[in-house]
Image (cartoon, rainbow, N blue to C red):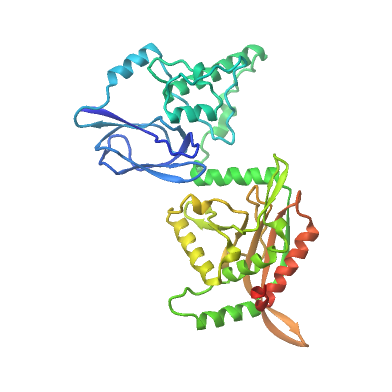
Amino acid sequence: MGIYRFKLPDIGEGVVEAEITSWHVKLGDTVEEDQPLADAMTDKATIELTSPVDGVIKTIACEEGDMLAVGADLVVLEIEGDGEDDDAEETEAAEAPTPKPAPLENKSTATPPPVPTAPRRTSDKVQASPAVRKRADAMNIDLADVPHAGARIEHSDLDAFLLSEREDAKLTSTQSAPAAPPEKPAAAKAESHLAEGETRIKVIGLRRVIAQRMQEAKRHIPHFTYVEEIDVTALEAFRARTNEKSADNKPKLTVLPLIIRALAETLKDWPQFNALYQDEAGYVSRFEDINLGIATQTDQGLIVPVLKRAQTLSMWQMANEIARLAEAARTNTLSTEDLKGATTTLTSLGPLGGIVTTPVINRPEVAIFGPNKIRKTLALEDGEIVERKVMNFSISCDHRVIDGYDAAAMMAELRARLEDPARIFLL
């Protein structure tokens, strides 16, 4: 019998760590080659990690929700025949003990390791894999500073170096700070114990990413929301006639492609809404193409695939592409390209849309559009009471770059197009 160490692979695109969002195996399981082991989530995508060999799971790297460095052991398997040479690893461990690395913090909250005050020495002659070099560069670590016992620096050496730096920083802080107050009695820690009937659910994966992004958006962006009521009676009649006359091979139109078409025409005159505010760099980027994020609810949470160059698409092209993106989001088959490049976002709950929403902007975008559900109402028209179909339409804006007057004026133009469908198609 031998040992095979399956390490978290280099996912590329500058990724140095990933969150293990779910395990498909447990200790002692017998697995076959290509059998799914775990799902790993980065800032760019979620990938399924499969076993490269047949074997039995002997160790698992971490719990669900923990961060794991590229190149670190994901699982260790016991396999038939000769495995890796563990003797060399044990010798190396004896010469340079490396404590079990703590899971790496999330990038958005992690404190980078201290930068050496001495002039940086070149690390060109230090032997290390491209993944190790990329990870060290991302954390501003000079490989020449990293102790290692083997012929080249491994991820475990980086982990040990980071851990020692943190311990040194903690020791320095302890020596310079006043003595800590005595620990509180156990009764004061009652909040850490489960209350009767309490269930705790760890916030991991997509839910964690959503939480972080929403928190960043609300912390950085001064939101304001403007709501316009739109009479969509004519629009709904136009949609019904179009669906009656459409070919059998075309999808039935929902109201969404019509809204997007009207929005694309309107934003030609209002480019400040189709923009990104790079606040830390101090500039706003405006775009000719409307790459519209379509917020889509899935079992894993809210995903925002991107409808590319929406202003160039016909209603049918939009309907087909929206259906493709929605299905890919629900089945977790979106490509990285499907998720990149949004310049503004539309979020809609369809029939569940409520009367009014106040959507949160997807930073660094400056606006997010939120059509609400269509409802019937009675209106007075030429002295007669008539039934109309109306929809409230919300827009949340970044008040640093968009004024309330501009939001109201832009929404008035959008309302005019939606209330007179012919204007949607007039250039």
Quadrant in the picture for residue 54 = top left
> In the image, what residue occupies the spot 60% across and 23% down?
184
Tell me the quarter of the image containing the N terminus. Answer: top left
Residue 24 sits in quarter: top left
Q: Quadrant of the C terminus?
A: bottom right
The answer to which of 27 and 327 lies nearer the viewer is 327
Residue 200 visible to the viewer: no
Seen at 43% across and 16% down, the residue is 148
Q: Position of residue 252 (x, y in %)?
A: 49, 75
| Relative to 112, residue 170 above or below | above
Q: Position of residue 225 (x, y in %)?
A: 72, 57
Q: Is 350 above or below relative to 386?
A: above
Q: Position of residue 409 (x, y in %)?
A: 77, 65
* Residue 84 shows in this picture: yes
Q: Describe residue 216's horizontal placement relative to residue 226 as left or right.
A: left
Counting every numbered tag in the picture gives 0
The residue at 28%/21% (across/down) is 86
**In x, y percent, where is residue 247?**
46, 80
Q: Looking at the image, which is closer to me, 347 or 258?
A: 258
Depth check: give the residue in front, 284 or 69.
284
